[in-house]
Amino acid sequence: MKDWHPNPRIREAMRNGDRIAICTSVPKCANPEQIVECAGPMPGVVILVHGVNDVGEAYATQAKGLCEGLNQRLGRTDLTPGNWDVARACRDNRVASYERRADQQGYNPIIPFYWGYRPVDKATYEADRARYREELARRGAAGADAPYDAYYIDGKSDPRRGFENVDCFDNRLDEHFAKNGGVFANATTSLIDMWGPGGDIFGLARWISSMGQDLSHTIPDAPHRIYMVNAAQRLANLILMIRRDNETTKNDSINIVAHSQGTLIAMLANFLVANGARPTRPADCLILNHSPYSLETPSLEAMQSHGPQQSRRARTETLVNICQLIGTHRKPGPTPETLACSGVAAQRIVGTATHVRDNHGKVFNYFCPHDQTVSLRNVQGMGWQGVPPAVAARCAPALAQRIFLDGRAMHSPPGPITLPDLKRTWLGVASNSDVPDGQVRDINAPALPDLGYTFALPAGCDTLGSSDWGVQSAAAAVEGENHVQFQSTDPRPGVRPLPRGYQQELLRTELAELEAAFAARGEHWTLVRATANSEGLFVTRYMTPEELRERARDTSTTTSNHSAIVLDEAASRCATAFDLAVGRCRSYDTGKLDGGAFWQKLLR
């Protein structure tokens, strides 16, 4: 509804989500009433946080499921997800951005949060290293600010880089010399490690990462992890903009729905909000999907660490503290009657407990025993095996757990469940821990309505998705798998084959002549080497960008089920939407088509 309309009846309808009739100048034979849909108030703020090595691929799916689920939960029809750029098919022939169009944001309370890593250019890197050496000599190790440890390399025209931008460790970067979510090897199982150096992967783990055709999860060396702390501070600043910097919005219902490494960034962000120079109330509800946060101290992780490994006790206390932080700062949500009177919910759902329950002050742990990433032996996260009863009891009443088990009806009543026997590995080697079958987990999250939803593992694609094509090409270059070899006659005028039994490798100047001769035939190749023989030439060349892209599109892969929850639209619709804290949202100005200046500032 346009903000300039002075009619108080329309303003009231906007608050209540009602339809109104407007009398207009129309012919006598026409109906003088025009039905107009009035959008209701936003039910809260929902911040989506993606994981490591991720461009937010699940955001469109989550947004669609959340809007449909909130409409169903609140008895509404007006919430829409907007238009997102996603892959149109399992094997699409283009690279999707997975971003929401700025001019088609829909009508929803969703803020997609993006984070990642961007190294500096080489000149800045070298200058900063010189600055560090000077400070080190003058002030000592304690007084010198750490230097940049990475720089980017423009590889878009370089066949040696697979025609991809990379950092100095050979991690693939996008066209902005950045990597959303940072590098795969830098995922952590504790908050403290986000202040540490990059992951040090060796031996078995490095070998496992390069098995088969799929090179999208190869593990080169990694930069410092400090960009994760910066991401947490940015997320904290987003919360503070709502809570502290705007008196009108300070009581908004803030939800953070996080995935993978994003769950640890969400946890740290809330600690930063509550423990900053001006302590402020944290988010109202955290929903953690597939979290790698671990209560274990895996020996493989210890061997990969550059410093001491955080103890089990410290990990447990951190989880207890985040739950207590969210729980003790709980500001109860509006009553069902208030939700209806304010227009957040329809009057008809007021008496339905599953639709109007108050989730303020809650931390939901969504875990999936089928997750083959969080079950890796150097991870063993709570997003795979859940939180054991003894620890969960200390996290009460804030902590609520849901298990996403293949074939399990999600409206199953709360209560203890015995973990199943799922002795399967992702890569067919001893890279994963087995689910601790026989152990009990208390599935204490409130009952969900019976919407006919049974969780099922995704069928997935058997080829790489578009967001991994560039990663595959860059990794192929590192592994030396971007070459093509062939026998050819020599295209250079006047050059004859060598006598039988003789062969000679061409010099660099001769390779340049050969490249020019091939180019004259329309074959624009960069040659690695060529050997003249009695049959002509045996040539090794780099694959072209088109060949690399085509091979990446056809590369076989297997699913790790690490995004099984967030990529399941029904999970967002039938579970997450009912676990959100709803009731207050002044950040979104419903009188403005784009939510107003403050909302747009939050989106940026």
Image (cartoon, grey):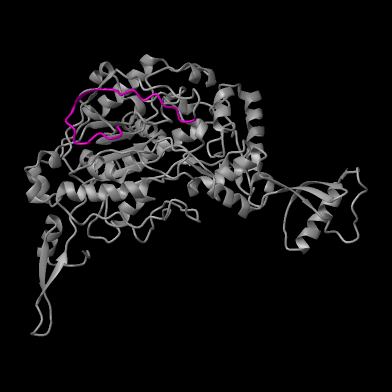
The residue drawn where x is 14% and y is 61% is 11
Q: Which percent across, then down, holds residue 175? A: 56, 51
Q: Quadrant of residue 115?
A: top left
Q: Which percent across, then down, holds residue 354? A: 14, 39
In the rendered image of this protein, does residue 191 appear above or below residue 56? above
In the rendered image of this protein, does residue 419 appear above or below residue 45? above
The residue drawn where x is 57% and y is 43% is 472
Pick the front one: 565 or 84:
565
Pick the front one: 221 or 121:
221
The residue drawn where x is 29% and y is 19% is 388
Q: Is residue 253 visible?
A: no
Q: How many marks?
A: 0
- Furthest residue toward front: 500
Quadrant of the drawing holding the N terminus:
bottom left
Q: Which percent across, then down, holds residue 278? A: 32, 33
Q: Is residue 420 magenta?
A: yes
Q: Which percent across, then down, holds residue 407? A: 27, 35
Q: Quadrant of residue 235?
A: top left
- Furthest residue toward right: 499
Q: Which residues are magenta?
A: 405-427
Pick the front one: 199 or 472:
472
Q: Is residue 401 visible?
A: yes
Relative placement, left or right, of 333 versus 158 is left
Q: Quadrant of residue 271?
A: top left
Look at the magenta stretch and give its main secondary structure.
loop
Relative placement, left or right, of 577 versus 309 is left
Relative placement, left or right, of 281 versus 335 is right
Q: Is residue 410 magenta?
A: yes
Pick the front one: 177 or 421:
421
